Image (tube, rainbow, N blue to C red):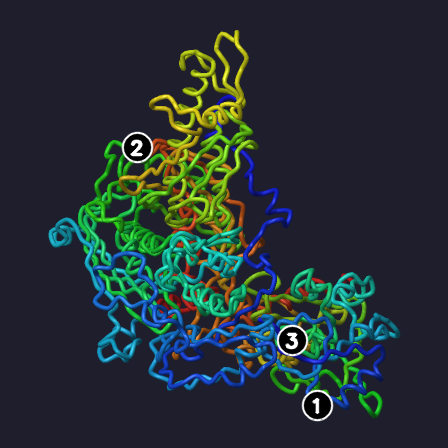
Amino acid sequence: MSGKSIGARVLRTEDARLLTGRGEFVDDIRLPGMLHAAFVRASFAHARIHGVDASAALALPGVRAVLTWADLSRGLQTTRLPSLVPNPYSKFPRTQLALAKDEVCYVGEAVAIVVADSRHVAEDAAALVSVDYEPLPAMSDCRDAVAEGAAPAHADLPDNKAATFKTAYGDVAAAFAGAAHLIKEALWIHRGCGQALECRGVVTDVGRDGMLTVWSSTQTPHLEKRVLADLLQRKPDTIRVIAPDVGGGFGPKAIFYGEDAIVAAAALRLKRPIKWIEDRREHFLATTQERDQYWSLEIALDADAKLRGVRGTMLHDTGAYMPWGVVMPYIAATTVPGPYILPAYDLDVTVAYTNKVPTTPVRGAGRPQAVFVMERLLDSAARALNIDPAEIRRRNLIQPEQMPYKVGLTFRDGKPVIYDSGDYPAAFGKAIELSAYADFPQRQKRAREEGRYIGIGIGSYVEGTGLGPFEGVRVAVEDDGTISVQSGAAPQGQGHKTMLAQIVAEQLQVPMTQIHVTVGDTAAFPMGIGTFASRVTANAGPSALLAARTVRDKILETASRILDAKVEDLVLDDGKVDLRTGNRRAVSLGDLAKASQGFPGFSFAPGQTPGLEHTAYFTPPQAAYCNGTHIVEVEADPETGAVKILNYAVAHDSGTLINPLIVDGQIQGGVAHGIGNTLLEWMGYDTNAQPVTTTFADYLLPSACEIPFVDAVHIETPSPLNPLGVKGAGEGGTIPAAAAIVAAVENALDPFSVKLNESPITPDRIVAAIDKARRRKHP
Amino acid sequence: MKPPPFRYHDPRTVDEAIGLLSTLDNAKVLAGGQSLMPMLNMRYVLPDDVIDINKIAALCYIRETDGVIEFGAMTRQRDIEFSDVVKARFPIIHEAILNVGHRQTRNRGTIGGSLCHLDPSAELVTMAAAHDAVVTVAGPNGTREIPFAQFPVTFMTTAIEANELVTGVRFPRWPAGHGYGFVEFARRHGDFAIASAAALLETDSNGKITRASVTLGGVSVTPVRVRAVEQALIGQKGSEDFFREVCEECRKVAAIDDVHAPANYRQHLATVMSRRALVAALGRVGKA
């Protein structure tokens, strides 16, 4: 082995095991004497609890315990689940208790746990637990929730304004006063669930040494350990959290859920291992989602279509609680300017409580909404000014020589939004080329002659990725010469192990097969933040590089001592160190590892440290901004409202690529997510805030049949913010999808003068929009 | 999402099954299980007894005699899909069955199960309505026949009694050279149809329509034969414009309003699907 592995399109080291069914997920863990849990969940969106009667459930054979709030320890009774980010904008930052005390605020909120010999019996018993509810008025629509005199979603709060804040820069008044064109739009964007194929799940076990081991399907094992210590009032070093193989995260598994603490508390009480596996219906009821944003925006332009300013308001539905504070609306508010030179901006944001499952980031985290509204404004402006949608964008793109570009906003990491690098016109141009945009008018003309309606749409975005504070990596040469790598960043299918191994392999010049990576175990690595916000490669990647470099230095120092040669005369390659002259026997990494640990009883030389290992914590100074452009070609059936995607082109710049194959997969999967969001997925609630789409027959996900092969091209503008030049790539596939697809459908239906300012666009909504346009024309 | 407790029975004969149905108060018959098993897991149904009829070999057959095809109740959808007789003589059933769920569900799903479950969007239910099929039902007092027009009572409710079992269904054949068309609109392939339409046509030597069957699936609580459209077609020469005009009648059908689609959208789709089915049918007249 010699040469580069960073940038190589290598197969993932994880796949052979996962694809042959040898993965180990939480539900694969079976411990002797293990019991099974089911939760009793609120059947009302808002109700007072007057009492819980578990006697019938407890009488059922095989039931071991039913625990309600009254049965919990003081810590669990009084400590609300943590808010994971500072939230200065909220007067009432409310999070939930692990089990509801006397009020439930959404359908699905956990009220009691039933522990039994099997999940079957646990479910039978859960149905027998009788909860005395007094229904209270429930808020379903966030617009109603913030109306004057609306009933509060939490009985003790004065109103449903969970938070309000302003995001602004520049002289908006002057921008609008001097504008040649003003365009105003009202827009609605709904986002549904993450819907990982593996639902949540937890197994807890208390060892004879008192060690509490928790296997959880989580994106954040170290966070889970910390919160469990707080809630259970245990010493952190008596808790070990393991995220085994996890079947998808997409955001909702990044927070801490009360069920994990309750299952642990039950295991501690019963002194038996307990498993709880969330079923799909529970996932719809009790796992966080994203939800509606209503935007009202006005854009001001010069006579030559240069942007002058954007102003307006946004209303965000946060659901019943805010475990992530205002992160999604905040990110949405700061993502609007995107890749464009926007001199002035003013947005007033209101965050509303409703009686629906809480929201936390889902892949994109507020950005798809922001990109949707900005790109829709540009399309409206292009139409009003009668210029091509591509042309209006070209005229406003930030130019590469303007980098680093200071937008004028403060991002959610508290740092000013400064785009670190990127060539936006280049990415835009690549997408234009890849989509054969220039020839589209001919294609459209031909199709119309055949009675077919095809359209094209553009969506461009800038995404703050690679958020800190850190992810650490330890690299060590083992005594047999293999390399072990540990990190606190736990994967859910992204390929962290492959990525870290590629980086380490290049530094230590060993084949990737000689590198063993351990992730997702708090006992294997002391600190970690988690896998979300497209952050792991930009945090753990540089840590792996720095750790491996130090280990490489240690290897060469040790070899220089043993071989009695200068470091600069040594060659590290293929698991051994050799002299450049080749006149002495090479030393293997294993022998060097052993030698580095000295001999019993003999002191080290001054300055010598034991072992060939090092742990590095890279801390990025700010977010690294990736960017890209999607161009979509669709065919719409105006009679049925059906939409078929004909071509999907992506130009994507996430800095230096460690493994293009993995990034291709992220783009393909991200686009699938975006197509689902735009054309299929809708999480419905009725007027009483009862969820009405709680199965996959009602909540429609895209399947292989609906997803085209995405044509992607990479542009690599290295980020100056980390030694690898990497940026995040996990969300860019999703972020501009809705904007581009809706634009394409609107373009296809142009002969009907249809205006589409919402997402998802379901067939019935498309037909209704055509009908509405027709009535407007011929009243 | 685990089923509630129930007793399980697996009779080997129809008589045995009828005996169980006659003595058990709250029993459900398990055929292919593609609807019942999820309903049990979600506890939408809570039977005390489940009678699995998969071991009654006598209920698995496809027979064609004198212009009538008869399917045993336990005939798998996949066997109907691959039946040469069906493909040759009942091409519309072949066309429709490709829209029934997915290959994996068709391997297990049965025609009898589909008819008894009576989902309004089920393709085989729509086929039975389109063909004026006749359902054979066994009970404690022997067998009886129910014309399909009388089989659905209301939403997912059939005319069979609690102690009866569907044993088979007969479809009368349309003559060689008839036109046929089945189209459906579902959100994704294999999903429940939001609206489907089946059209069967016969014409005379002048091309005038002499016989027509037009059926809507998924639109209303049960499949609907749109008699007004059928009558308007008789004696006329078909054309897309003519069909467009005639199919407006479908907008009057009482439609389901649910999370998948509002009623007025279903009614709109009914006009589109019925027209497209008729256009397809007209194009195929005389070709088979």
Residue at x-position 78% and y-position 61% = B82
Q: How crowded is mark 3: few (under 14 residues within 10 Å), some or many (20 or more)?
A: many
**Closest to the observer, A476 or B58:** A476
The quarter in which the N terminus of chain A is drawn is: top right
Q: Name the residue under label 1.
A: B25
- Does dot 3 land on a helix, a strand or a loop? strand
Q: Mark 2 points at which residue?
A: A720
Left or right, residue A514 beside residue B235: left
Residue at x-position 51% and y-position 24% = A589
Q: What residue type is labelled 2?
A: Pro
Q: Which amino acid does label 1 sit on?
A: Asp
Question: Are dots 1 and 3 on a single chain?
Answer: yes
Q: Mark 2 lies on which chain?
A: A
CB-based contact (under 8 Å), mark 3 and mark 2: no
| Image height of A122 relative to A612, above or below | below
Q: Is residue A216 visible?
A: no
Image coordinates of residue A282 in percent, x first then y, are 49, 69
CB-based contact (under 8 Å), mark 1 and mark 3: no
Left or right, residue A242 beside residue A33: left
Image coordinates of residue A70 in percent, x first then y, are 39, 78
Image coordinates of residue B150 in percent, x first then y, are 70, 87
Q: Which chain carries label 1?
A: B
- Does dot 1 land on a helix, a strand or a loop? loop
**Closest to the observer, A533 or A374:** A533
Q: Name the residue under label 3.
A: B215
Q: How crowded is mark 2: few (under 14 residues within 10 Å), some or many (20 or more)?
A: some
Q: Residue at the bottom extreme?
A: B141
Mark nearer the N terminus (1 vs 3): 1
- Does dot 2 land on a helix, a strand or a loop? loop
